[in-house]
Image: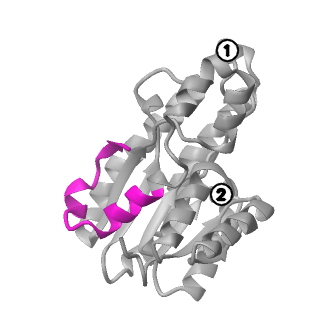
């Protein structure tokens, strides 16, 4: 997999799945634009990308703030000729996400998942659409979703966010298709992120067996690189894949 000459923007790149995706894309030769609010986390991801021989550009942005997103998109447009891939991985993971109990017994800010997760994906893709249309080799949008789109998982705010992402994927693909931009959704399985490992340490009987078969944090990045270079990329557009 050779992504030399390709530019990939990854939101939520300061930790977890987003960080792993960015490292995998950078290791394959892409120039990776790293975006999140946590600048220290972004710098750590940049260091990890460059340690694997990749090139990283750190572009902090609060994806819940429209003005911040507009400025972010303008900076990308000024510095880069185009964007070949946008990976929408930014999310809000409240501390109470995996706590037992009904949603009304949990803090109301659990609903922030809808803003930083669903709405942020719409806003980021809207802002970068001109840059995606400028790719000479055909571009790709990947929305990181979850089986929680169709099954109960972590409560209604999480489920609504993921179901909304899958619908965004379907409808964005319809609008982008005449311009050669593919849009796909990915459902990762259990991923060996820092939070997953912490949960397994805190509740080994409950989460330990899941961690043993978890995907590496870079796994989805390798899938995205393969999708970006696939000859049947447009045939997959609008669909959701369980990675």
What is the crowding at mark 1: few (fewer than 14 residues within 10 Å), some, or many (at least 20)? few
Nearest the eye: 201 or 7: 201
* Residue 9: image tag: none
Residue 192 appears in the figure: yes
Does 73 sit left or right of 174 as displayed?
right
Does 140 sit left or right of 67 as displayed?
left
Q: Name the residue under label 1.
A: 100
Q: In this view, does 232 lie above or below 16?
A: below
Q: Distance between the residues labelled 1 and 2?
A: 29 Å
Q: Residue at coordinates 55% horizontally, 82% vertically from top-left?
A: 77
Q: Residue at coordinates 49% horizontally, 34% vertically from top-left?
A: 213
Quadrant of the rendering where the N terminus is positioned = bottom left
What is the crowding at mark 2: few (fewer than 14 residues within 10 Å), some, or many (at least 20)? many
Instruction: Inspect the magenta stretch and tell me whether residue 21 lies in it.
Output: no
Q: Name the residue under label 2.
A: 63
**What residue span does the magenta drawing correspond to?**
221-243
Does 27 sit left or right of 138 as displayed?
right
Q: Position of residue 43 (x, y in %)?
A: 74, 68
Q: Residue at coordinates 45% horizontally, 51% vertically from top-left?
A: 143
The mark that comes first in sequence, 1 or 2, is 2
Which marked residue is nearer to the observer: mark 1 or mark 2?
1
Residue 236: quadrant of the picture: bottom left
Q: Position of residue 37 (x, y in %)?
A: 74, 59
Q: Is residue 221 above or below residue 47?
A: above
Instruction: Inspect the magenta stretch and tell me whether residue 242 lies in it.
Output: yes
Q: Where is residue 129 in the image (x, y as percent from the top left)?
A: 44, 70
Q: Residue at coordinates 67% horizontally, 12% vertically from top-left?
A: 101
Residue 172 appears in the figure: no
């Amino acid at each position: 997999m050779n992504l030399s000459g390709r530019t990939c923007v990854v939101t939520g790149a300061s930790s977890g799945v987003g960080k792993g995706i960015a490292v995998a894309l950078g290791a394959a030769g892409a120039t990776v634009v790293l975006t999140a609010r946590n600048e220290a986390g972004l710098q750590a991801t940049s260091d990890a990308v460059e340690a694997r021989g990749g090139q990283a550009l750190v572009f902090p942005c609060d994806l819940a703030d429209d003005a911040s997103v507009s400025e972010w998109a303008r900076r990308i447009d000024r510095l880069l000729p185009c964007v070949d891939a946008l990976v929408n991985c930014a999310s809000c993971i409240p501390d109470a996400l995996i706590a037992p109990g009904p949603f009304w017994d949990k803090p109301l800010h659990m609903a922030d998942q809808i803003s930083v997760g669903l709405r942020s994906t719409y806003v980021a893709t809207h802002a970068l659409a001109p840059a995606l249309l400028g790719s000479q080799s055909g571009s790709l949008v990947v929305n990181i979703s979850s089986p929680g789109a169709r099954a109960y998982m972590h409560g209604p705010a999480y489920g609504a966010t993921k179901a909304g992402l899958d619908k965004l994927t379907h409808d964005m693909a319809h609008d982008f298709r005449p311009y050669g931009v593919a849009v796909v959704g990915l459902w990762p399985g259990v991923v060996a992120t820092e939070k997953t490992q912490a949960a397994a340490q805190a509740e080994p009987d409950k989460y330990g067996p899941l961690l043993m078969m978890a995907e590496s944090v870079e796994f989805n990045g390798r899938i995205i690189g393969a999708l970006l270079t696939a000859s049947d990329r447009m045939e997959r557009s609008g669909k959701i894949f369980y990675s």
